[in-house]
Image: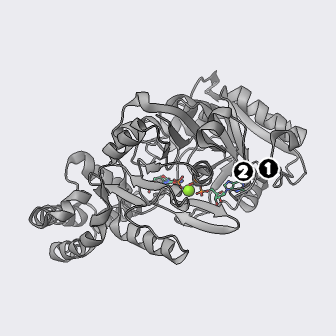
Amino acid sequence: MPVMIVVGVQWGDEGKGKIVDFLTERAKLVVRFQGGNNAGHTVIVEGRKTALKLIPSGILRPATRCLLAAGVVVDPQALFAEFDALGEVGIEVTPQRFGIAGEVTLVLPYHRAIDAEREAQLAAKKIGTTGKGIGPAYEDSVSRYAVRAADLFNPSHLEALISRNVELKNKYLKAVLNSETQFDAKELFDELCALAGRLKPYLANVSLEVNEACARNEYVMFEGAQGSLLDINHGTYPYVTSSHTVAGFACVSAGFGPRLTNLVVGICKAYATRVGSGPFPTEDLTEEGARMREVGREFGTVTGRPRRCGWFDVMAVRRAARLNGIDTLVITKLDVLSGFSQVKLGVSYELDGTPLQDLPVCADDIERLKVKYEELPGWNEDITAVRSFGELPKAAQEVLRRIEDAVQCRIGGFSVGPDREQTIIMDERIRSFAKV
Ligand code: GDP
Ligand code: IMO
Ligand code: MG
């Protein structure tokens, strides 16, 4: 029952896609378990770049089947656009290679409109969402108003759902959000009927497939999207996404028992980034943060927005390690720190003069935190050709050791560039699992 769950332990964009791709050469299944096309995972293989949003990063491995589990929200138009984009780079997303749970909630045009209108109304207090309608779609799921993928194949039921929902959303847009945007139920119904035929061959029983693969002792990988500090319950609420991003949700979403999980791997950058609004205790607004953005090319895959940059936050990652039960961390983008005279680690928090053991619950309090930093000597060498821990400059080794010590979680690997080959895995459990 070799199940591995890979999650981001910061605010997203940790390089999950790159590491999942690296670890899935022999995976039978790669399963996305939450989020939607708010995710953007860039994978580079031999210099060729692929940007993935909804489709798991395992799609780059020809023998791997990719699945979207029940807890994912799917914008069908975005999904087909991704099929087409992958087709253009020679990756054909066939029903053998990709499946989607009938239970997934669909993201529909009214969700996108509500997302945009709400953000506009929140103005200075906006969450800074990706604008993909993710939050409103999850709301429909929880309120039991969702249109789910399986509903597309029952036209009379679909028509009734769409007609009720469009009426409600139109009222909400007009009366509550004061918006001019309105939708036509018949038009949306026709649009969805036209998409249904294309989606049908991809419908899958994800829980059954996952459990059967486990019973056959096949390698199943769960790919997280976003990051632990964007989790709807455990993140920096309300500046979070609307799904559970932590590892435990893989079981809930894909329908398997927690005892089947063997290894939980946390991905984090050697520094920290965040897109959108919300507290970011170790944010660096000086030229050092700007340099991280420049060297690390920290611009969003989905929205192109510049990512906010700052230093590694030990307290935040320690919290995430606990929330997920991380067995081992993989540190990405270590190469971006080459050339900094000093590398800072935010090691502890104080609020109103009192030392804290964890992130406070309320965003306002997180904003007011004082962070204590440790400064470690930097290095100047280009490390992008390094392929083992021993080849790293001593100062870089020391940074990894200090992170491991401070977070109290083993570092099982690191990455020194965006390409698949620029990945070094030391942890024997990951190596034997993924046969890398
Ligand atoms: P994800 O959302 O967690 O999959 O991460 P993204 O793909 O949104 O963002 C990570 C970015 O960093 C991508 O452009 C990757 O190609 C790039 N990347 C990943 N690992 C490394 C690394 O070790 N070094 C450098 N320089 N870039 C990396
Ligand atoms: P990946 O998988 C970074 C952020 C948005 C916003 C908040 C809510 O590439 O790591 P949403 O559209 O989800 O309602 O926006 O969450 N966010 C991400 N930030 N990486 C992501 O995904 C993100 N997905 C959502 O910027 O602050
Ligand atoms: Mg991303």
The residue at which mark 1 appears reads as: 337
Is the CB of mark 1 within 8 Å of ligand 1?
Answer: no
Q: Nearer the viewer, residue 423 or 300?
A: 423
Residue 328 lies left or right of residue 322; in this view the side is: right
Left or right: where 84 falls relative to 206: right
Q: Which residue is mark 2?
A: 333
Residue at left offset 63%, top offset 54%: 308
Residue 147 in sight in this render = no
Residue visible at 81% across and 40% down in the picture: 389
Residue 275 pos. (x, y %): 56, 55
**Mark 1 surroundings: few (<14), some (14-19) or many (≥20) residues within 10 A:** many
The CB of the residue at mark 2 lies under 8 Å from ligand 1: yes
User: Where residue 330 sits in the image (x, y, percent)?
Assistant: 66, 41
Element at badge 2? loop
Q: Answer yes or no: is residue 162 visible.
A: yes
Q: Quadrant of the C terminus?
A: top right
Q: Quadrant location of residue 48?
A: bottom right
Whether tag 2 and tag 1 are in contact, CB under 8 A, the answer is yes
How far apart marks 2 and 1 lie (CA) works out to 8 Å
Answer with left or right where residue 263 lies relative to residue 178.
right
**Residue mark closest to the camera, 2 vs 1:** 2
Ligand 1: give its quadrant. Answer: bottom right
- The amino acid pointed to by label 1 is Leu
User: Looking at numbered disc 2 in the image, what kind of residue is underneath it?
Assistant: Lys
Q: How is the image coloured?
A: one colour
- Residue closer to the observer: 23 or 113: 23
